[in-house]
Amino acid sequence: MVWRRAPPQVVFESAGQHPRSNQPPPLSASDLLCEAFTAAPVAEVYAVSVHQASMDKRFPFTNLLYQARMYEQFVEQHFEDLVVPKLMKDVGPVDGGPLTRRRVLWRAHFLSLA
């Protein structure tokens, strides 16, 4: 399995403490990025093999990741037609099929070597 961390796109409006506020200053961009990796560690996987029993199941990261502002930039990078797969059989070949290079986002908590 080949994968790498998928860096989220973090947007923040202002930096520094408001002069009339007792609130601490907002986190820096690097701190926000670190928190995003910790809260939602996401991997960019380069090939997936789907078990026969799972082929008609829903690809769980269509809504969870690709529609999130932090990761929406990956739709264009991963899918030429800008259509995110809905089912697992659309993500990769079913048991024993030849692997092809296809990048998809995957929650790092669910990575396993089989």
Image (tube, rainbow, N blue to C red):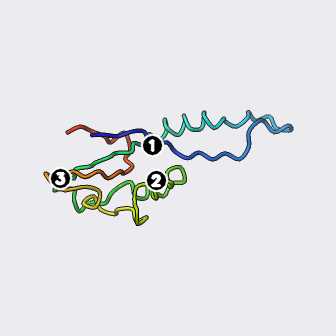
Residue on which disc 1 sits: 6
Earlier in the chain: of badge 1 and badge 2, it is 1
Circle 2 Cα neighbour tier, 10 Å, few/some/many (<14 / 14–19 / ≥20):
many
Viewer-nearest of labels 2 and 3? 3
The x, y position of residue 90, in whole percent, is: 28, 61
Q: Amino acid at mark 3?
A: Pro
On screen, residue 27 versus residue 35, left or right, reads: right
Query: Residue extending furthest left?
Result: 96
Circle 3 Cα neighbour tier, 10 Å, few/some/many (<14 / 14–19 / ≥20):
few
The x, y position of residue 26, in whole percent, is: 70, 37
Residues at marks 2 and 3, CA–CA distance in whole angstroms:
24 Å
Q: Are marks 1 and 2 in contact (CB under 8 Å)?
A: yes
Residues at marks 1 and 2, CA–CA distance in whole angstroms:
9 Å
In depth, the one of 38 and 77 nearer the eye is 77
Residue 33, above or below 84 = above
Q: Are marks 3 and 1 in contact (CB under 8 Å)?
A: no
Residue on which disc 3 sits: 98
Q: Secondary structure at mark 2?
A: helix
Residue on which disc 2 sits: 74
On screen, residue 102 versus residue 23, left or right, reads: left
Kindly identify the residue that appears in the image at 21 percent across and 56 percent down.
Answer: 93
Figure quadrant of residue 64: bottom left
Residues at marks 3 and 1, CA–CA distance in whole angstroms:
25 Å
